[in-house]
Amino acid sequence: MKVFVTGVGGQLGHDVVNELDGRGHKVTGSDIAPNYSGVQDGTAVTETDYISLDITDKNAVDAVIEKLRPDVIVHCAAWTAVDAAEDEENREKVFAINEYGTKNIAEAAKKVDAKMIYISTDYVFNGMGTQPWTADCKDYAPLNVYGKSKLAGELAVCKTLEKYFIVRIAWVFGLNGKNFIKTMLNVAKNHDKVRVVNDQIGTPTYTLDLAVLLADMAQSDKYGYYHATNEGGFISWYDFTKEIYKQAGVTTQVEPVTTREYGISKAARPFNSRLDKSKLVEMGFKPLPVWQDALARYLKEIEE
């Protein structure tokens, strides 16, 4: 199977390439950088498997996908800087990447009859209430520019293609790039106490585990909307930090605060990021491992 993966310079794209490559598929990765700049571990994309591509350039996207003619496209490329997306000077670029770039990929996929896996987010919902959001829920009401742009990307995919997977994830962490775990471990080096919000509830997603699921999806035809985070129950960012420090042997004290008390953030954050993942099992996919185990494996990985 031939697979084209966008956004391989990021946390998820890097792991997806390695997972697919490990299964013996022919994988080509792309990102905006002239050369592949991700973590190299022996199975990462090489120069010959990497194509520099600006997904906002429709002609370039068409040319690359027409040449490769992949069976599957895993679209991980995105603008993910949530607060920066709120800045007026960035908004046009955010939609150029997350909406129109995604549309370019979807239209090119249609021309070569490729399946498409689009990575979306819990931010497409309004984050209110306490009930988990179901995969097929259409009660969209994103609170910020990032969420609106990712929803626009979802709509571009489902209006263009029939052979698609839209996979919403939340609280992502992986080896390749910045994430909450790395930030909190760095903060602990210089602080005896940290304040972390306890009224935003969700579940973390380890990119290494998610990559396994996405590779399984790429080999299937069970199309549609899915939610995918690690198992292990719903927690707050405060709970997550407590477990990070516990497992890492960090003694920094963690103080729970409300989002209002914490302040700072430019972009409104959802309070309810609970994602109902039951559709995965219903459709025969294997759920991700519990987040506590994922965290332990991740901490071991970044220590090495």
Image (cartoon, rainbow, N blue to C red):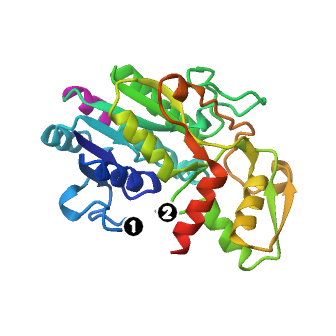
87 sits to left or right of 50: right
Q: Is mark 1 on a helix, strand or loop?
A: loop
Residue at far bottom of view? 190
Residue 149 at least partly seen: no
Q: Earlier in the sequence, mark 2 or mark 1?
A: 1
Residue 289 at what x, y percent from top left? 58, 45
**Where residue 39 is drawn, which disc sits there?**
1
**Where residue 175 is drawn, which disc sits there?**
2
Residue at far left of view? 67
| Residue closer to the observer: 82 or 69 | 69
Q: How many other residues sit within 10 Å of disc 1, few (<14), some (14-19) or many (≥20)?
A: some
In the rendered structure, which amino acid carries the disc numbered 2? Leu
Q: Do the residues labelled 2 and 1 touch (CB within 8 Å)?
A: yes
Range covered by the magenta-colored residues: 105-111
In the rendered structure, which amino acid carries the disc numbered 1? Val
| Residue closer to the observer: 273 or 214 | 214
Q: Which residue is drawn at 71% across and 34% down?
A: 127
Magenta stretch: includes residue 153: no
Magenta stretch: includes residue 109: yes
Residue 124 at what x, y percent from top left? 59, 33
Q: Residue at x 25, y 30 (%)?
A: 114
Q: Is residue 12 above or below residue 241?
A: above
Looking at the magenta stretch, what is its main secondary structure?
A: helix
Residue 71 at least partly seen: yes
| Residue closer to the observer: 272 or 252 | 252
